[in-house]
Image (cartoon, grey):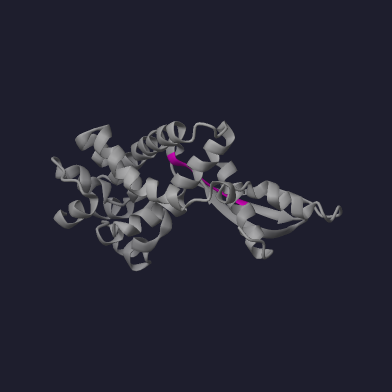
Amino acid sequence: MKTLEEYLNYEFRDKRLLQNALTHSSYANEVRGGVTSNERLEFLGDSVLSIVVSSYIYENYKTMPEGELTRLRSSLVCEKTLCTFSRKLNLGEFLLLGKGERKNGGAERDSILADAFEAVLAAIYLDGGIEPARKHVMRFIIPELERYDIKADLKDYKTLLQEIVQRNPEESVSYVLTGESGPDHDKKFTVEVRLNSNTIGTGTGKSKKDAEEMAAMQALKLMGEPV
């Protein structure tokens, strides 16, 4: 625990919060005996992350319209980005996973790592307040923003795909919701994008819109388009 606190640059007053943040549902279900999973902390962490990132980009990108602000925030808090942050913290090493989940590579699974980042953020927020939470988030977000070429990275993948498909009038694109998972407060959606009746991409996101964008991006990659 001490090692992880060093990675986090934060020392918990209540160590139980950090332990709870690291407890996956597979472990809690296996051990039982009053052990609770990190799902509630993940729910809170998602909101803390959103307000911290939203406030920062609102204040620092004053000429950016609402739609682009939304896409920028989505790219900064998406599963792919959050699991990258988790890997930088080596969170996978510290997660409490059920035996089956551990054996099946759960410590490296993107969704589990992204959820753990949010849960740990919530633990910091509950233990120390918004400022330590903000400091923790921004140590990752600022370098991520510095890496961005805003015009290049904030692509509307669905529009790009539609523009390509429209070159052939006989072709049509549709998006089909193929799955939902997770509790009501933290749904994950899976969408397939289909060219006529053929699936050309699949995406997962915390909203149907995000899932559609990820599916369109995968389709563009399949077509050899730069994304």
Q: Residue at x 61, y 48 (%)?
A: 155
> Magenta: predominant secondary structure element?
strand
Q: Residue at x 33, y 68 (%)?
A: 103
* Residue 3 in view here: yes
Does the segment drawn in magenta span residue 184? no
Q: Specify the quadrant that holds the C terminus.
A: bottom right
Q: Position of residue 168 (x, y in %)?
A: 84, 56
Front residue (pair 207, 133) = 133
Q: How many marks?
A: 0
Q: Specify the quadrant that holds the N terminus.
A: bottom left
Q: Position of residue 126 (x, y in %)?
A: 24, 35
- Give the quadrant of residue 123: top left
Q: Is residue 130 above or below residue 204?
A: above
Q: Residue at x 20, y 37 (%)?
A: 127
Specify the segment rendered in magenta: 186-191
Front residue (pair 22, 122) = 122
Front residue (pair 128, 188) = 128
Q: Position of residue 73 (x, y in %)?
A: 48, 40
Residue 177 as seen in the image, left or right of residue 17: right
Give the residue at the far bottom of this rendering.
Answer: 103
Residue 152 as seen in the image, left or right of residue 187: right
Residue 211 as seen in the image, left or right of residue 172: left
